[in-house]
Image (cartoon, rainbow, N blue to C red):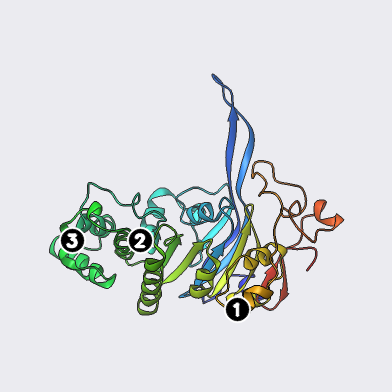
Amino acid sequence: MSGEDLHQGVGTTTLVKVEGLKRYFPVKRGILIQRQVGSIKAVDGVSFEINKAETFGLVGESGCGKSTTARAILQLQKPTGGHVFYEGVDLTGLKSEAMRRMRSKMQMIFQDPYASLNPRMTVASIVGEPMEVHNIARGKERDERVSYLLEKVGLNPSMANRFPHEFSGGQRQRIGIARALAPEPKLIVCDEPISALDVSVQAQVVNLLTALQKELGLTYLFIAHDLSMVRHISDRVGVMYLGKIVELADRVDLYNRALHPYTQALLSAVPVPDPLVEEKRKRIILSGEMPSPSNPPKGCPFHPRCPVKMDICSAEVPAWRQVVAGHWAACHKV
């Protein structure tokens, strides 16, 4: 299916379709009577699709809206606008009970393996709880499935009665992965699942996620700011800046032929393990910092920092268009 087809409707291979997603946070002032004086536009009109059994990477600087996008997709935070379709069902229109039934199909692996596990619960309770909540397994059947999942993520089932503080960071993240697998989901959102881990452990966790995807046919939304890791694990990559996706393409095409100046700057900062190539590469140093999402610039959101900006960039929002097959960008220069 072509990139153009993917942006025109839910096809047979589409699992999730995000359409004009917005998530604004109100800015209020006042002591006794608070009134809204503005909005923080954390996610501002994001659209993309995730196909079945693929890994869609989402990258960008800290604060660009990646995690908020993920939480809005899972309805952990209610979107301010837009739609999220899961197998054709609009999640934004579901009542609480209907959404609760959908939760088993969508799970999340959190960034911090230390804060995301309840310290008062054993591993068996942590992994087994989703099975009970969604009426998948109870009693002996639940215990057997907990042992199976722990073994599946590379942990000894005999550790089931231990508490989270008895494990290392990498082991805790494996527990988090087992918990995400417990209700047998189709979609797993990986919200920077390796950023808090040692470099030696990161590759192990990524290889585990890849192996589980092949075996179980899982679909991943993989959020990270490590572009080299995203290139390794993703099929397609979306680049976010100030609440918007500025470029989207197949990983090979994106890394070999980045079109947006922001993507080019990000890729220029990725180290290359070849001294000769590294020496010849040209670094793109961006001036200033990302503008505040409560007061985004007019026109292209990237224009205050763009090294190749034109007059039109500060006046007109660039159109989101397909430049070549499957490669989308929002830039006047392209």
Give the structural element (helix, strand or loop) at label 2: helix
- Whether residue 117 is visible here, answered yes or no, is yes
| Residue at numbered disc 2 | 104
Q: How many other residues sit within 10 Å of disc 1, few (<14), some (14-19) or many (≥20)?
A: some
Query: Marks 3 and 1, how far apart in space?
Result: 41 Å
Quarter occupied by the N terminus = bottom right
- 1 and 2 marks in contact (CB < 8 Å): no
Q: Residue furthest top?
A: 32
Query: Marks 2 and 3, how far apart in space?
Result: 22 Å
Q: Horizontal and vertical percent for residue 162?
A: 18, 56
Residue at 48% x, 67% y is 87
Q: Nearer the viewer, mark 2 or mark 3?
A: 3
Q: Against 158, is 125 above or below?
A: above
- 3 and 1 marks in contact (CB < 8 Å): no
216 with respect to 226 (left or right): left
Quadrant of residue 153 within the rendered picture: bottom left
Disc on the earlier residue, 2 or 3 = 2
Q: In the image, which disc is placed on residue 252? A: 1
Disc on the earlier residue, 1 or 2 = 2
Q: How many other residues sit within 10 Å of disc 2, few (<14), some (14-19) or many (≥20)?
A: many
